[in-house]
Image (cartoon, helix red, strand yellow):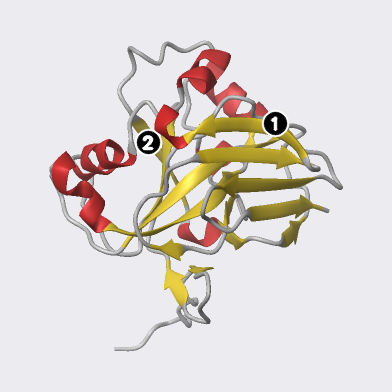
């Protein structure tokens, strides 16, 4: 069997200390997983269960990239996040077994067209075009191994704008994986953006944003 059109190369992200790359199957993102971030958008973090949205796998971009300011927005926001890469999958995964699925982790930036998101929320429409646009998932080099501890920071032009402990997550990584596996069947190659702390804000042309997580390589992007 052949293909009418040549299949595209699989999206992938860098691996720290290796020339190999990690092929990406799907990108899942958790909404409102830090209490202060939930509150800054007027939500109650103690009431809402975890919810998820997706980005296309080919939205992934390596750290160090310079990107054009995206179309159809005047309010591009950064969101610093821990990204978890799965090396195994499954469905209905118990929380106690969830971390065994993790291949490694990276720093990431969930770029968001905030004005389109606000419009979609007001009209009770999906968020797809505010979150899943081209080059909207910045991912630093993956470090193979367990989920890190410590702090996450987001720096705009060298100034800290976001900072939190990873333990401040409302739903820790094991709980996120277990809950998501009850909604879809997870598989090797899946990435999970695990939520952003308070302090999200706008990026302008010429700005650089760096996501730093203790023990991981940074995820850096510049808007040209």
Above or below: residue 155 compared with residue 39: below
Bin the neighbour count of mark 1 within 10 Å (Cα to Cα): few under 14, some 14-19, many 20 and up: some
Q: Which residue is mark 2?
A: 52
Q: Are marks 1 and 2 in contact (CB under 8 Å)?
A: no
Please report the residue visible at 71 percent of the width from the left and 40 percent of the height from the top.
155
Image quadrant of residue 205? top right
- Of all residues, the one furthest to the bottom in this rendering is 1
Which residue occupies the foreground of this view, 74 or 175?
A: 175
Above or below: residue 139 compared with residue 213: below
Secondary element under disc 1, as helix, strand or loop, is strand
Does any portion of residue 93 appear in the rendered image? no
Q: Which residue is mark 1?
A: 161
Q: Is residue 177 left or right of residue 109?
A: left
- The CA span between labels 1 and 2 is 24 Å
- Of all residues, the one furthest to the right in this rendering is 206
- Numbered disc in front, either 1 or 2: 1
Provide residue 28's location: percent of width, then percent of height.
39, 46
Above or below: residue 90 compared with residue 205: below
Provide residue 160's location: percent of width, then percent of height.
72, 34
Quarter of the image where the N terminus is located: bottom left
Which residue occupies the foreground of this view, 5 or 171?
A: 171
The disc, 1 or 2, on the residue closer to the chain's N-terminal end is 2
Bin the neighbour count of mark 2 within 10 Å (Cα to Cα): few under 14, some 14-19, many 20 and up: some
Provide residue 126's location: percent of width, then percent of height.
46, 31
């Amino acid at each position: 069997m052949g293909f009418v059109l040549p299949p595209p190369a699989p999206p992938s992200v860098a691996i720290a200390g290796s020339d190999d790359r990690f092929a990406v199957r799907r990108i899942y993102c958790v909404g409102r997983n830090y209490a202060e971030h939930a509150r800054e958008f007027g939500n109650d973090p103690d009431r809402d269960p975890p919810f998820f949205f997706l980005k296309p796998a080919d939205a992934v971009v390596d750290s160090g990239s310079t990107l054009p300011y995206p179309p159809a927005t005047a309010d591009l926001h950064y969101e610093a996040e821990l990204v978890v890469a799965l090396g195994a999958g499954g469905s209905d995964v118990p929380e106690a077994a969830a971390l065994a699925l993790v291949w490694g982790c990276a720093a990431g930036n969930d770029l968001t067209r905030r004005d389109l998101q606000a419009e979609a929320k007001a009209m009770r429409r999906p968020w797809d075009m505010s979150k899943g646009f081209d080059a909207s998932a910045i991912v630093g080099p993956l470090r193979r191994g367990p989920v890190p501890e410590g702090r996450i920071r987001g720096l705009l032009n060298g100034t800290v704008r976001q900072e939190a402990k990873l333990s401040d997550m409302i739903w820790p990584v094991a709980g996120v994986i277990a809950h998501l596996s009850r909604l879809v069947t997870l598989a090797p190659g899946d990435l999970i953006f695990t939520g952003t702390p308070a302090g999200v804000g706008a990026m302008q042309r010429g700005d650089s944003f760096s996501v730093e997580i203790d023990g991981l390589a940074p995820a850096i992007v510049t808007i040209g």
